[in-house]
Image (cartoon, coloured by chain):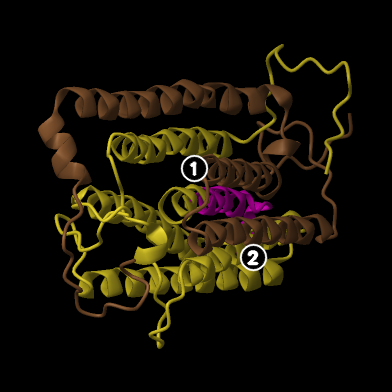
């Protein structure tokens, strides 16, 4: 292969750098667009507080997936991970698979704890679901307490 | 920007890095991976506590203020903060891009804009914390009722201030690193070295801060 002036002994093949910034700006517009959609969905939940529970959950699910898409674009294009060698990408991505267990197990445990406590601790359940008088605090704006 | 790697190239036979990556940059990646686990431990513990609670404050009712106005604007200010951070990520990647082209003026210009973006974000966060504090929220104090009107706990503000504080500290250290890199670039140190790898490493850290914000924004403000 051709010998470039070596910028570092660890680098034996040089990236081919695209002199245009089109890809960067395209990624910016994608990120902005996804953020606006997320914001819109977030506000939908605010505007329609009495929507069905399953719809509420579905919107939250969609927002989570959109955030993962944003994370993919930032890591792959802004951090240039997509341009690295496959072996290197795998040393980063494979350990992150631990998140599947990490998130799933802990969220499950939290939910299970809530259900068990509601079943076996009726006093706690009553205390934590009883409506309380809220006195408006300093700087209270309309829409705060509905 | 695909790499020109010959198909039959043997990476693991010694004499060269099988990852084709400079040591410092590789270690920055592994540091960021460990930092990702630290942040996710925070966010997942927040999620666990939230799932174990019968009710939780509604973020749209907590985060509805904007500087210089008393209007009810849910999510508006935090969207501005998100935009600022995405924008500073773009200026950072443009600085890295100019570094690849060995263009010192370009690197200095975009690094300077990245620092401006970072400072703007920190200013926004300072305003938000101050505002929440005047409303009575702090570690151990939570004035915001649960969404169903039941008695709130302090879990909400404890997690909010701890996690946004930890993220804000990352932004702060990122700004300090960026200032150091800007001075080094401006003094021509990277031109003498013949490469702008330090800008790439600082860039990785800065993009990671933006990446974490995506999830902080998701967990605290959106859902």
Q: Which residues are magenta?
A: B188-211
CA separation in Å, label 2 and label 1 = 41 Å
- Compared to residue B194, the image places residue B179 above or below, namely below
> In which quarter of the view is residue A89 placed?
top right
Q: Which chain is yellow?
A: B
Let me know if residue A33 appears in the view.
yes
Q: Where is the C terminus of chain A found, in terms of image quarters? A: bottom left
Closest to the observer, A112 or B109: A112
Chain to which mark 2 belongs: B
Closest to the observer, B102 or A97: A97
Closest to the observer, B129 or A139: A139
The numbered mark at residue A29 is none
Badge 2 crowding class, 10 Å Cα cut-off, few under 14, some 14 to 19, many 20 or more, is: many
- Compared to residue A106, the image places residue B173 above or below, namely below
Residue drawn at x 62%, y 49% is: B197
> Which residue position is annotated with label 1?
A53
**Which hue belongs to chain A?**
brown
- Badge 1 marks a residue whose secondary structure is helix
Q: Where is the N terminus of chain A found, in terms of image quarters? A: top right
Chain to which mark 1 belongs: A
Magenta segment includes B210: yes
The numbered mark at residue B91 is 2
- Badge 2 marks a residue whose secondary structure is helix
Residue drawn at x 64%, y 23% is: A90
């Amino acid at each position: 292969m051709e010998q470039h002036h070596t910028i570092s002994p660890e680098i034996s093949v040089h990236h081919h750098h695209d002199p245009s910034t089109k890809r960067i700006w395209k990624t910016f517009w994608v990120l902005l667009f996804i953020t606006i959609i997320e914001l819109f969905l977030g506000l939908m939940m605010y505007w329609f507080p009495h929507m069905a529970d399953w719809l509420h959950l579905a919107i939250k699910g969609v927002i989570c997936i959109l955030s993962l898409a944003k994370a993919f674009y930032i890591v792959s294009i802004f951090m240039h991970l997509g341009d690295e060698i496959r072996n290197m990408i795998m040393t980063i991505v494979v350990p992150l698979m631990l998140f599947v267990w990490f998130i799933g197990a802990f969220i499950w445990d939290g939910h299970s704890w809530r259900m068990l406590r509601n079943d076996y601790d009726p006093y706690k359940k009553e205390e934590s679901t009883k409506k309380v008088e809220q006195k408006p605090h300093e700087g209270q704006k309309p829409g705060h307490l509905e | 920007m695909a790499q020109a790697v010959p198909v039959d190239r043997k990476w693991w036979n010694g004499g060269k890095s099988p990852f084709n990556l400079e040591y410092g940059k590789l270690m920055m990646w592994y540091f960021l991976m460990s930092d990702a686990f630290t942040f996710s431990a925070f966010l997942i513990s927040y999620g666990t506590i939230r799932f174990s609670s019968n009710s939780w404050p509604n973020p749209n009712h907590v985060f509805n203020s904007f500087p210089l106005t008393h209007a009810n604007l849910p999510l508006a200010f935090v969207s501005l903060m998100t935009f600022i951070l995405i924008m500073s990520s773009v200026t950072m990647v443009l600085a890295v891009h100019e570094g690849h082209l060995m263009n010192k003026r370009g690197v200095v210009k975009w690094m300077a804009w990245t620092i401006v973006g970072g400072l703007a974000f920190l200013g926004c966060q300072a305003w938000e914390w101050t505002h929440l504090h005047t409303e009575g929220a702090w570690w151990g104090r939570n004035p915001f009722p649960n969404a169903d009107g039941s008695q709130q706990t302090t879990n909400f503000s404890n997690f909010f201030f701890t996690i946004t504080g930890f993220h804000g500290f990352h932004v702060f250290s990122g700004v300090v690193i960026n200032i150091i890199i800007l001075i080094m670039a401006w003094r021509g140190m990277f031109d003498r070295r013949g490469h702008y790898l330090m800008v790439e490493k600082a860039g990785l850290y800065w993009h990671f801060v933006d990446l974490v914000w995506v999830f902080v924004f998701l967990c605290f403000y959106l859902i």
